[in-house]
């Protein structure tokens, strides 16, 4: 799924676990940056647990997954004749390894909360961990043809 083939195909995406946060507004703003920092802090807290003296059951050494995002526009943004980044709706997320349970996520959350005083922690308490159910998806690679120097 993360390395799609050049030919479009329908795939079944297995159940996955993510740290996810929803938001609205310009992704160039401080609120968006703060959410990204929270997601990476939580993800690295899980990754570093064995070095902090706790090894979750089933833990395997891994690389923190990349940031992913789902984007949309508010109803007002969809009706507008111009695109305003302030009207973006988004869900930003980082996939977690299969061993990450709600208990592991809670431990990561508490670790980060103690180390990083972030003003909006309380708003995000219920957004710690989400399970994405299996689903069927259509995936394809988008390519952009480039022009040669002669313009052909």
Image: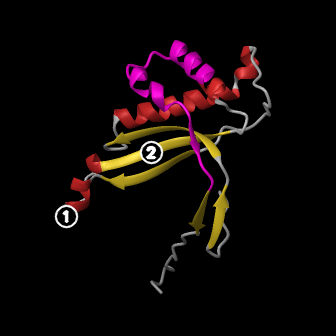
Dot 1 falls on a residue whose secondary structure is: loop
What x and y, as percent, mark residue 132?
Answer: 58, 47
Q: Please tell me whether residue 121 belongs to the stretch shown in magenta.
A: yes
Disc number placed over residue 5 in the picture, else none: none
Q: Which residue does the image show at 21% across and 54% down from the upper left?
A: 76
Q: Which residue is at the front of the view, 128 or 135? A: 135
**Dot 1, how many residues are within 10 Å of its Cα: few (below 14), some (14-19), or many (20+)?**
few
Residue 147, above or below 134: below
> Residue 1's image quarter?
bottom right
Residues at marks 2 and 1, CA–CA distance in whole angstroms = 24 Å
Q: Please tell me whether residue 120 belongs to the stretch shown in magenta.
A: yes
Q: Which residue does the image show at 58% across and 64% down from the upper left?
A: 137
> Residue 99's image quarter?
top right
Q: Which residue does the image show at 61% across and 31% down from the upper left?
A: 43
Disc number placed over residue 91 in the picture, else none: 2
User: What's drawn in magenta, residue-wise?
Assistant: 106-134
Q: Is residue 12 left or right of residue 148?
A: right
Dot 2 falls on a residue whose secondary structure is: strand
What x and y, as percent, mark residue 37?
Answer: 49, 31
Residue 149, above or below 135: below
> Residue 96's image quarter?
top right
Q: Which residue is mark 1?
A: 81
**Dot 2, how many residues are within 10 Å of its Cα: few (below 14), some (14-19), or many (20+)?**
some
Q: Which residue is at the front of the view, 3 or 139? A: 139
Of the image marks 2 and 1, the number of the one nearer the N terminus = 1
């Amino acid at each position: 799924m993360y390395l799609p083939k050049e030919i479009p195909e329908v795939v079944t995406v297995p159940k996955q676990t993510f740290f996810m946060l929803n938001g609205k507004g310009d992704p160039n703003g401080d609120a968006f940056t703060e959410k990204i920092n929270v997601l990476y802090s939580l993800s690295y807290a899980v990754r570093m647990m064995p070095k902090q003296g706790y090894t979750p059951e089933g833990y395997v050494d891994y690389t923190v997954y990349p940031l992913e995002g789902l984007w949309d526009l508010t109803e007002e943004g969809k009706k507008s004749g111009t695109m305003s980044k302030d009207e973006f709706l988004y869900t930003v997320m980082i996939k977690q390894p299969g061993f990450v349970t709600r208990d592991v996520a809670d431990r990561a959350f508490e670790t980060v909360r103690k180390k990083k005083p972030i003003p909006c922690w309380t708003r995000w308490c219920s957004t710690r961990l989400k399970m994405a159910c299996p689903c069927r998806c259509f995936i394809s690679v988008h390519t952009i043809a480039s022009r040669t120097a002669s313009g052909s």
